[in-house]
Amino acid sequence: MSGMNVSNVGASAGQAVSAGKDKTLSQADFLSLLTEQMRNQDPTKPMDSSQMVSQLAQISQVSATQDLQASFDDLSKSMQSNQILRASGMVGRTVVVPSAAGTLRDGALDGAVNVPDGGGQVLVKINDTHGNVLRTISLGAPPAGLARFHWDGMGDDGQALPAGTYGLAAQAGNTAVATYVSGKVTGVGMTGSDGVYLDVDGFGGALLSQVAQIN
């Protein structure tokens, strides 16, 4: 009779099951190990049936977990593909995304301000890279929500400013409020963790979840 230690074999089976997530122990592997364990058990100390049931339960649980994970992975890939497909329909559309800077191009920059309830007088300020205010645009007292603005590229002194990136700031009454820029979607993609993103002309990459308005 083989001198194999039954308790050691049982421990090995249990450890192999516990490590199933990392080493992917299949049901066939487990049953083969269990058969070998039974073949080499000591007749005077037969395998505990409760131990066998416990090990079978463990392998079933690991197998079910692996199958469930595979199903979630497949579902995730399917959802990502569907999101990209749907987002591709936005190519060529104009979107409004949050930004504290905008690009003056062809003598124009379009954006928006998120006006709160009872915001009062709304001002948009165009700044240079040093924070100096070059142009102040009054939007009056628009209702709550996104209030669009258009900058013609002119400074407060009436002189045309060169193309490039300028800072944006806005206030409603005495409260600072968020600014947005408008741009055409030129492409779509998928990030590893944040989902679908859009390539917005004059802005760069913006997450689909950041889009405040589509025109």
Image (cartoon, rainbow, N blue to C red):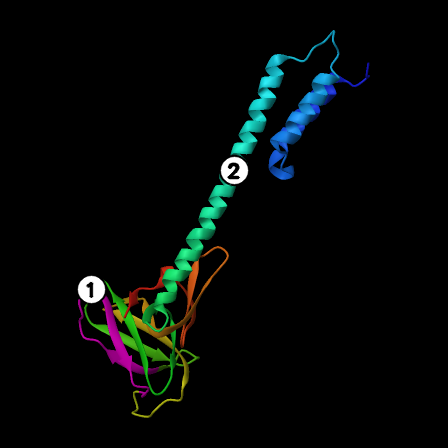
Residue 158 percent across, percent down from the top left: 29, 92
Under mark 1, the amino acid is Ala
Q: CA distance from mark 2 to mark 1?
A: 50 Å
Which label sits on residue 144? 1
Q: Is residue 55 above or below residue 25?
A: above
Residue assigned mark 2: 67
Residue 160 percent across, percent down from the top left: 34, 91
Q: Is residue 95 above or below residue 126?
A: above
Judge whether residue 115 is colored magenta.
no
Residue 29 percent across, percent down from the top left: 66, 31
Q: Residue at x 63, y 39 (%)?
A: 22
What are the residue bounds of the magenta stretch? 134-155
Instruction: Tell me which numbered mark, 2 or 1, is placed earlier along the sequence.
Output: 2
Residue 14 percent across, percent down from the top left: 65, 25
How crowded is the residue under tag 1: few (<14 C-alpha within 10 Å), some, or many (20+)? some
131 left or right, relative to 55:
left
> Which quadrant is home to the N terminus?
top right
How crowded is the residue under tag 2: few (<14 C-alpha within 10 Å), some, or many (20+)? few
71 left or right, relative to 112:
right
Q: Is residue 23 above or below residue 34?
A: below
174 and 147: which one is in front? 147
Q: Residue at x 21, y 76 (%)?
A: 139
Local secondary structure at mark 1: loop
Local secondary structure at mark 2: helix
68 and 114: which one is in front? 68
Q: Which mark's residue is nearer the viewer, 2 or 1?
A: 2
Q: Quadrant of residue 130?
A: bottom left
